[in-house]
Amino acid sequence: MIRLFDQHRVRQHKELEGFWTFLKDDGKEYSLPVPGCWEQHPELVNFRGKGTYIRHVHVSRSCHVRLEFKGVSHTADVYFDDAFVAHHYNAFTPFSGIVRDVQPGDHVIRVEVDNTFGEHSALHIPNDYYTYGGIIRPVVVEELERAYVKDVRFLPFLKDNRWFAKVTVCVENLGTASQSMTVLIRLAGTEIQSSVTVAAGAAEEIVWEQPYSQAESWSPKHPRLYLLETEMIDERGMVIDDLIERVGFREVGISGNRLLVNGEPVFLKGFNRHEDHGVYGSAIPPQLMAQDMDLLQEAGANAVRTSHYPNDERFLDLCDERGMLVWEENHARGFGLPHMKSPNFDQQCADCIDEMIAAHYNHPSIVIWGILNECASETAEGRTIYQRQYEQIKQLDNSRPTTSATCRHFSDICLDLPDIVSFNLYAGWYENMPTRERLCQELDWIASSGGAGKPVIVSEFGAGAIYGFRDRGHAKWSEERQADILRDNLESFRDDGRLTGVFIWQLADCRVSEEWFSSRPRCHNNKGLVDEFRRPKEAFDVVKELFPTMG
Ligand code: ADA
């Protein structure tokens, strides 16, 4: 499954799912599923290294071939019949490449994959989650004509209480001569078209801004979605390409210390969710994404944070369909200043932000962009990096508020930069001060340190529990102790009233890098309210009881 809706009716495309040949760096050959993590194979459970995926593909006619990789962990070099196509770093963002003038017949795709750590990888490092290896998300092969619809962006806004939208379509001429074409968009019962001439090898943008008076709003309770269809029509009147996006009419804003969706204040009752599963690793199939969504809704959640990286767009499609509000963030967890100054850090962060927003801009469920979880926001040099990344986001998308989850308590010097202030607080687990007292301390400090008047989110809180460990004494790591701490935290946050949201750490247990967390029992982060196989712990029922009483 590529997306939860069809993106093309005209463009020839297919997913290259199934079993690919995998040549490990020592020459041994395997047959591995794609999408998939190589750790799923019993001989590769702890393999950190390089390998090459190989697959044959049949092209039906002379055309340009576009290959899109939704996620390769963590570095890919792609070849088509031994011709280099694309290089990409980061498991969590998509990339593509175009092979010109391909003849019909059989061709070979080769993907060299690397999940090693080192200076070449500033974002994938030993950490409190696991960097798997493999082609972890779908691969799509497309057959393009001499021009194609490259990108479609949808920006809804209310004017005089009516829905309007700005639609920007980018078309690219792959031919060797200038081309004139008509571009047509169809949305919510309205059709509009424009003609454009594109020079050889160039791309052009067409922008429409117009009312959609019949459109119904997208909201958490009424997640109304529309297909935005774009067609490219050549001089003969033939539709030679198309691209379908799925959109929702909603606005995100801030009023005082509250986040607004369509002008209504929302209280975010959320979970942090790693893309990790006990069987599939980070290559979670759509069926299990749906199970995670069902668990979120069963718990009474209305929000999810993609901790700590851009998510699989099929999960975001699910959030769009279910009205689950999303805080999506760039790929970063717990980097101190020395690491933030490493050679590849800035560029790899900038690329991730570019790719995250380019790929996920149209999802109505995304209401917050986040950056740099628990990085060096207490330092002047760190502040420069935070400032640059917030500015980058605002240049790419000024329609959503920004935030960053800090743990630099009483020392953070960046709280004036984001639209929303967020902090991680493990009262009852890492800290022993009574939660209510500790919360007041934090909120008072935020108000006096750049965050005054801003919405505030407790972006992480929770406790560890080993699934199945029950103890009458409520010992640490027992399910009882986790349930006690969640109850205390949730009741304290509910009764305070100054927050616009809370996110529990975390939905499910996840595997961690052994070299980073020897203290992590089972080499897992065990703060999930379900284990890695989605078996609920006692605390899950506490959340089911209390979330409905919040917000
Ligand atoms: C931090 C971090 C999380 C996780 C958590 C924990 O808040 O942001 O990724 O590591 O600590 O479990 O300690």
Image: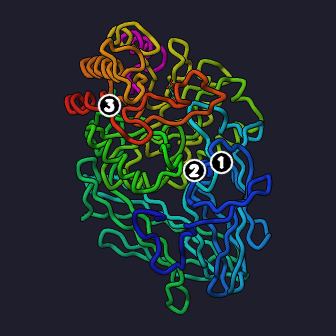
Amino acid under label 2? Gln
The CA span between labels 2 and 1 is 7 Å
Q: Which residues are magenta?
A: 440-461
Mark 2 in CB contact with mark 1 (< 8 angstroms): yes
Amino acid under label 3? Arg
- CA neighbours of label 2 inside 10 A, class few (<14), some (14 to 19), many (20+): many
The label shown at residue 40 is 2
- In percent of the image, x 45 and y 23: which residue is there? 423
Front-lying residue, 251 or 52? 52
The label shown at residue 44 is 1
Front-lying residue, 288 or 202? 288
Mark 3 element type? strand
Give the mark nearer the N terminus: 3 vs 1: 1
Asked if the residue at label 1 sits under 8 Å from ligand 1, the reply is no
Q: Whole-percent x and y of residue 273?
A: 44, 39
Front-lying residue, 504 or 229? 504
The label shown at residue 258 is 3
The label shown at residue 541 is none
Amino acid under label 1? Leu
Mark 1 element type? helix
Q: Whole-percent x and y of residue 430?
A: 47, 14
Where 369 sits versus 206, above or below? Answer: above
Apparent side of residue 45 relative to residue 189 in the rendered image (left or right) = right
Mark 2 element type? helix
Q: Whole-percent x and y of residue 91?
A: 61, 48
The CA span between labels 3 and 1 is 47 Å
